[in-house]
């Protein structure tokens, strides 16, 4: 057994990192009009370079920009697509005991991905400042559809929410090519929709919003595979399946069994970052659907929701339990989620965050280099 030389790596990370004090202060000043766009960018640039160096110092091979230029893990990207607007609403996304900022998505024209999408420049900056593997994260197309309100379509281009699938897949095809052309070889689609399809509570909410939940798995599988069909052979595209991550809270519960066959066997991803830090994620049995071969499941056994450092032996024991259903060669390790899926961040300290990432690196050496 050995470390992997291509993504996903034995010791990996989901993507987002706790925003530094300088980032928080700069974004607050920018919202108040006290600093310009250029001044905000200069501060972001400097802070991103610092956290790139920190990731390299502790030994990580995949390096991200921490999503420091974003407020949300998903809405920023969506709002930068053609035909999509992020607008104020009378409600946010409801987590356990807390609600996010009150914003929703509207479809205002033909959905598309243009060469001027700002996140291409975000990636280029990351790539220019690391000697490791730059990893880019974007929300999965399924997330957009699942999050749309019943009245979200504000254009005659689409009859309803379900009419966006083809154009959304085409937009992601262009995004994949554009990021590849920018030098990206490690791209991740972050996805909460599959986790919600495992939750009876979230399925009921989706039905109440008018979604045809009985056919969503097939629709999402088809759309995702369409988005991935032109992926170059030397580009890795993974997905991270999340049950919600906002200020250390969550949205959904439920094991992967209801979606495992479609997700692991039929979706053409190279790897899967799966949350496994609590019993809300269920057992490892659904991993039996992972085809033997090159696909990798990255076990999210280390929580990003609290600063308490797990015991290495407990993590290694759980990795061993997972090998009852999938070969160790097809496994890797990461945090359960990012540390700051939104700019607010989770309730742990920066040094606790780095300690968790360092521990993951140590465990990976003990498990896969042994």
Image (cartoon, helix red, strand yellow):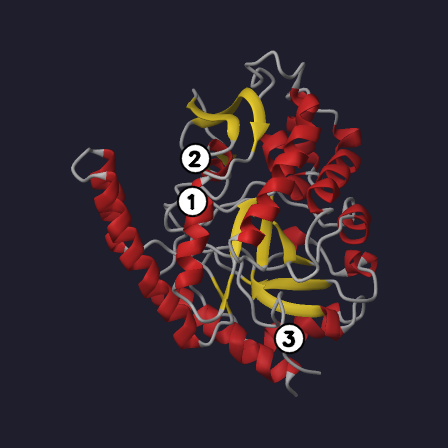
Distance of label 1 from label 2 (alpha carbons): 9 Å
Q: Are marks 2 and 3 in contact (CB under 8 Å)?
A: no
What residue occupies the far top of the structure in this picture?
156
Q: Provide residue 145's location: percent of width, then percent of height.
A: 63, 30
Q: Quadrant of residue 301?
A: bottom right
- Disc 2 residue crowd, few under 14, some 14–19, many 20+, Cα 10 Å: some
Query: Is disc 3 in contact with disc 1, using a CB cutoff of under 8 Å?
Result: no
Quadrant of the rendered structure where residue 321 is? bottom right
Nearer the N terminus, badge 3 or badge 1? 3
Q: Report crowding for label 1: few under 14, some 14 to 19, many 20 or more residues within 10 A (C-alpha).
A: many
Q: Which of marks 2 and 1 precedes in the sequence?
A: 2
Rendered residue at 79%/67% (across/down): 326
Residue 305, above or below 79? below
In this rendering, which labeled residue sits more in front, label 1 or label 2? Answer: 1
Asked if residue 148 shows in the view, the reply is: no
From the top left corner, tell me how far across and down residue 22 is, in percent: 24, 53
Residue 126, compared with residue 332, is above or below; it is above
Residue drawn at x 49%, y 55% as measured from the top left:
338
Look at the image and tell me whether residue 87 can be seen.
yes
Instruction: Return the residue at label 1.
Output: 342
Other-residue count near label 3 (Cα within 10 Å), few / some / many at <14 / 14–19 / ≥20:
few
In this orientation, which residue lies closer to the viewer: 180 or 221? 180
| CA distance for labels 2 and 3 | 37 Å
Are dots 1 and 2 in contact, CB under 8 Å?
Answer: yes
Q: Is residue 287 left or right of residue 135?
A: right
Element assignment for label 2: loop
As drawn, the label of residue 100 is 2
User: Which label was assigned to residue 157?
Assistant: none
Observer-side mark, 2 or 3, equals: 3
Instruction: Indicate which disc residue 4 carries.
Output: 3
């Amino acid at each position: 057994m050995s470390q992997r030389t291509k993504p996903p790596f034995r010791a990996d990370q989901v993507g987002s990192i706790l925003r530094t004090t300088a980032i928080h202060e700069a974004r607050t000043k920018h919202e108040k009009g006290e600093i310009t766009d250029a001044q905000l960018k200069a501060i972001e640039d400097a802070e991103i370079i610092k956290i790139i160096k920190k990731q390299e110092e502790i030994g990580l091979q995949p390096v991200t920009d921490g999503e420091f230029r974003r407020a949300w893990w998903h809405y920023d990207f969506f709002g930068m697509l053609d035909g999509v607007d992020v607008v104020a609403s009378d409600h946010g996304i409801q987590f356990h005991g807390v609600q996010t900022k009150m914003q929703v998505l509207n479809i205002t024209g033909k959905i598309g991905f243009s060469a001027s999408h700002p996140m291409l420049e975000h990636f280029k900056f990351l790539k220019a400042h690391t000697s490791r593997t730059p990893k880019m994260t974007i929300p999965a197309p399924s997330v957009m559809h699942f999050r749309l309100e019943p009245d979200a379509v504000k254009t005659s281009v689409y009859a309803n929410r379900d009419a966006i699938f083809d154009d959304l897949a085409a937009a992601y095809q262009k995004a994949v090519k554009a990021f590849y052309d920018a030098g990206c070889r490690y791209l991740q689609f972050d996805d909460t929709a599959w986790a919600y399809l495992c939750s009876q509570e979230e399925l009921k909410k989706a039905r109440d919003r008018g979604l045809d939940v009985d056919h969503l798995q097939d629709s999402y599988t088809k759309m995702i595979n369409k988005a991935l069909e032109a992926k170059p052979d030397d580009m890795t595209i993974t997905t991270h399946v999340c049950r919600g991550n906002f200020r250390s809270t969550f949205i959904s519960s439920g094991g992967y069994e209801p979606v495992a066959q479609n997700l692991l066997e039929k979706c053409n991803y190279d790897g899967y970052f799966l949350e496994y830090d609590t019993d809300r994620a269920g057992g490892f049995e659904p991993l039996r659907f992972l085809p033997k071969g090159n696909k990798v499941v990255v076990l999210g056994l280390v929580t990003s929701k609290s600063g308490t450092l797990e015991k290495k032996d407990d993590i290694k024991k759980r990795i061993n339990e997972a090998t009852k259903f999938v070969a160790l060669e097809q496994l890797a390790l990461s945090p359960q989620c990012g540390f700051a899926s939104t700019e607010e961040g989770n309730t742990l300290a920066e040094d606790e965050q780095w300690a968790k990432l360092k521990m993951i690196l140590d465990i990976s050496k003990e498990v896969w280099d042994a």
